[in-house]
Image: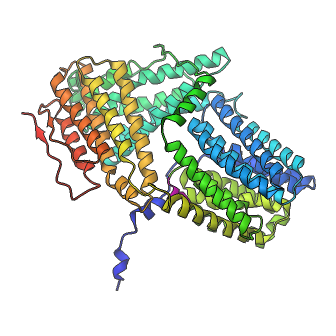
Amino acid sequence: MRSPRADLAAPRWLVQLLRTDPAPIPWSRIVRAVVGFTVPIAVGYLLGEPAIGALVSAGVLPTVLGDGSWPYAYRAKRLGITVCAAVFGFGLGLVTGADPWLSHPTVVLVAAVSALISAGGNNASFAALQLLVFVTLGTGQAEAGADVLVALACVVTGGVWGLLLALSGWTVHATSPERQAVAQVYIELAAMHSAEGEATSLTARHQLTTAMNTAYDRLLTARSWLSGRDATYRRLLNLLSATTPAVEASVAMVNAGQRAPREVIAHFTDLAAAVLANAPLPAPPTARSATDSADSGAGGPDPADSPEAALYHALTKIDTEQERSRPRRVPWVRRVRDWADSLASGPLTWMAAARLTLCVAVAELVRLTVPLDNSYWITLTVGLVLKPDFGSVFGRAVLRGVGTVAGVGIGAAVLGLGAAQHSVALVAVVAFLSAGLVLGQVRNYGIFSAFVTPLIILQMDLSIGGDWSVVLARLADTVVGCAIVLVFGYLLWPGTRRPQVGGRLADVADTVARYVEVSLGPDADRVEGSRCRRHAYRGLADLRTAFQQLVVEPSPAGRQAAAWWPAIASLEQVTDAATAVAVSVSHGADRPAASDVRLVTAALAELSAAVREQRDPVDVDLPDTDQLAGVADLVDTAFDAVRGPNLTRSKFPFRRRR
């Protein structure tokens, strides 16, 4: 007989916390990580200096953690800044670490500066994290009596070695990341038209949005001082821009429950192959006539304003001839000014800095007052968990603790079997940990923690003569660090558990309203409409990411994010439906009445205001025309979805315009 508890579902936050991202395995990054970490250790053993080799391997850590499939120029800037920040932080930790009354205030000050620097963008944020991590590691090395110059030289050597590996393919495959990004758009188009079932189609459309965002991000940041290579970037950007009408027509078809013919799907895959091979683009398929379709047993091609006809027409426009202007470089002075403005414009960055500084200060106080052996790992745990822009504090603290327990088991097994005393065995273990670290980065933070913990133990602690007791000490340090974060940075921190997601949902609703106005209004502009559509989809994708970070919390904020999740799907469907109408208008259908378009945008504005002000929406009118019926129905659904966080509210009232 089954226990009554056997059918009880696991808590929502726990399910979300333990889920893994089904991202593809990044084989090239795994290879670079394995080579980067193992070669210094192997060379160190060959030269009779395994401790030196382990420390050089530690210097590779920033380049492995910050690596990705971005354009090489962007990758060089990102990793170069990161290595410089890590080296500076490590040197600062080495110099101040011997005196506890100097090192502890230094670490707290660096924590505050690190949080403020994070507001400067993605690259600045990651460099700031490495600054904090390596100043902490530097103090640990100084407390253990490491030679300052030798240790600093090892980390510099490791950083340079990691940079060389990360940029090794630049001269041979200079434009490969950009080509892969553009080709992925065509692959996702083919996948979306091949998908069966509503859920599969929705997932395919999300992947198409991600592919478009990635391609534009890479191409708009890719530049080269070589004119021929820069011309290649421009051609790829022109090709991506010319593909936008095909993307819009495809979304309109899928939204109408249609799929492209097999010849069109095959054409998308041929386009992907041509882009990857830098070959001439294949000729587009010819639109089928009604007679041909009837003879083949398929439904005849739709009228000229149909999504299928629009897709065939869009395929003829995919080329690289239509020039698109590239954005000008933003001067560094302007970037610094924008960063300063962001610090002055709102309290969010300052609140994040205050929280990180408080928790690091508590961690350093614990290190001063509690007799723990070489306990810099407490502060390291606090810094990694509380990084302000890397997701839920609660989720990262729990996963960090669970992952570290698993990592300690791996580390204990390594030491118990004596692998650290045998060069071949240690190199094999480091290779295994390196591969797991990279895989954990793209799949789950807990997996990442399980592999990064024993790796850093081997690099930092065993390089100065650690033994198996070091592993147990790291477990205690991690538990203390996670407890500090959960108590001072989450449970006691004001506003942490209160719902704070409504503002972002309201902003995205405003973005969707703007797209409807620009694409369907009387003064509609095709280019501006496409730009607004991309902006809307990007906002929706970012909102999904933000909500995914919150749903792992058992707090009211997590429950609200879970309850409002259907609202994101409804706004995505509104955007899809508006795209379908815009495509039909661009191919001959009548434009919706301006008054009807205003009703839709006013309804979305009211939805946005109600979410932002935490109130019930007022009565709204929605158009009752066949052309906008789909858009109106989905706006109606979005209103219903928004009332999810408070099920005691009365149903939002609607009044269709007759």
Residue that extends furthest to the left in the rendered view of this protein: 658
Place residue 529 in its image quadrant: top left
Which of the image's four quarters has the C terminus? top left
Residue 593 x, y percent position in the rendering: 16, 22
Q: Nearer the viewer, residue 72 or 524?
A: 524
Q: Main secondary structure of the magenta part?
A: helix
Left or right: 561, with 549 as reference point = left
Does the image show residue 377?
yes
Place residue 117 in its image quadrant: top right
Q: Nearer the viewer, residue 602 or 529?
A: 602
Query: Which region is colored magenta?
Result: 392-398
Q: Nearer the viewer, residue 194 or 226?
A: 226
Which of the image's four quarters has the N terminus? bottom left
Query: Does 262 appear in magenta?
Result: no
Residue that extends furthest to the front in the rendered view of this protein: 101
Residue that extends furthest to the right in the rendered view of this protein: 48
Does the image show residue 384?
no
In the image, what residue occupies the spot 72% across and 40% down?
85
Residue 396 x, y percent position in the rendering: 54, 57
